């Protein structure tokens, strides 16, 4: 049984939301040659606040990959829970995800309340430390999976990949 990146992030975000009250969670994942940004929203944010979050996340990504734009995945969990236009993000916390001295990514939490993260900062850091090990294993698995279906010299999909795709399409 192998976790997908999406499933792992979904369960981690649910765990974080049970620890701290936040309106948005974001995860920036740095992997070989690409940057992924996953943004999970608890409610419909005003467009101005959403733009602030996106600008902040893009500023964190600047300089990490030369010409490549990050891949965005926005998960909107709180459809129907409309935030009023007067609500603004008042606090945020950013925690690096480090495993064996390598920066794997960054966790960013945003809230409508002041100082909501202060009491939970240590807990969040511990959860992020545990998550970094799982994320590292998942990235290694994805890398090995990619190596097993591509030719090392040409980087073209190999015969194994052809048969896997054929089997999936045929069934």
Image (cartoon, rainbow, N blue to C red):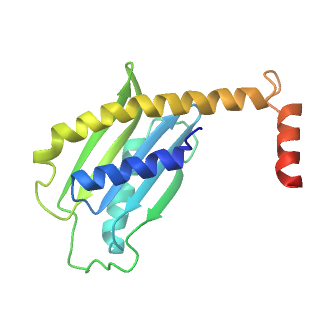
* 12 vs 144: above or below: below
Residue 142 % position (x, y):
61, 33
Q: Is residue 96 visible?
A: yes
Q: Quadrant of residue 99?
A: top left
Residue lying farthest to the top in this orientation: 100
- Quarter of the figure that contains the N terminus: top right
Q: Quadrant of residue 84?
A: bottom left
- Relative to residue 140, is residue 147 drawn left or right? right
Residue lying farthest to the front in this orientation: 1
Q: Is residue 70 visible?
A: no
- Relative to residue 116, is residue 165 drawn left or right? right
Residue 47 % position (x, y):
36, 73
Q: Name the residue rendered at 52%, 36% in the picture.
A: 65
Q: Name the residue rendered at 23%, 41% in the picture.
A: 124
Judging depth in this view, the residue of 109 and 33 nearest the camera is 109
* 111 vs 29: above or below: below
- Relative to residue 83, is residue 1 drawn left or right? right
Residue 19 % position (x, y):
22, 51
Q: Name the residue rendered at 55%, 41% in the picture.
A: 3
Q: Name the residue rendered at 78%, 31% in the picture.
A: 149
Query: How many labels were placed on the picture?
Result: 0
- Quarter of the figure that contains the C terminus: bottom right
Residue 136 % position (x, y):
47, 29
Judging depth in this view, the residue of 79 and 65 nearest the camera is 79
């Amino acid at each position: 049984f192998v976790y997908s990146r999406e499933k792992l992030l979904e369960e981690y975000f649910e765990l974080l939301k049970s620890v701290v009250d936040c309106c948005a969670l974001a995860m920036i994942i740095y992997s070989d040659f690409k940057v992924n940004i996953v943004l999970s929203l608890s409610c419909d944010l005003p467009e101005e606040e959403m733009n602030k979050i996106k600008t902040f996340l893009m500023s964190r990504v600047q300089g990490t990959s030369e010409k490549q734009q990050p891949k965005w995945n926005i998960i909107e969990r709180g459809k129907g829970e409309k935030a009023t236009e007067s609500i603004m993000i008042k606090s945020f916390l950013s925690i690096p995800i480090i495993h064996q001295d390598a920066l794997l990514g960054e966790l960013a939490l945003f809230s409508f309340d002041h100082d909501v993260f202060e009491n939970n900062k240590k807990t969040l850091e511990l959860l992020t430390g545990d998550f970094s090990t799982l994320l590292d294993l998942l990235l290694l698995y994805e890398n090995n999976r990619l190596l097993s279906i591509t030719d090392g010299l040409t980087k073209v999909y190999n015969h194994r990949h052809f048969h896997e795709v054929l089997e999936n399409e045929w069934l």
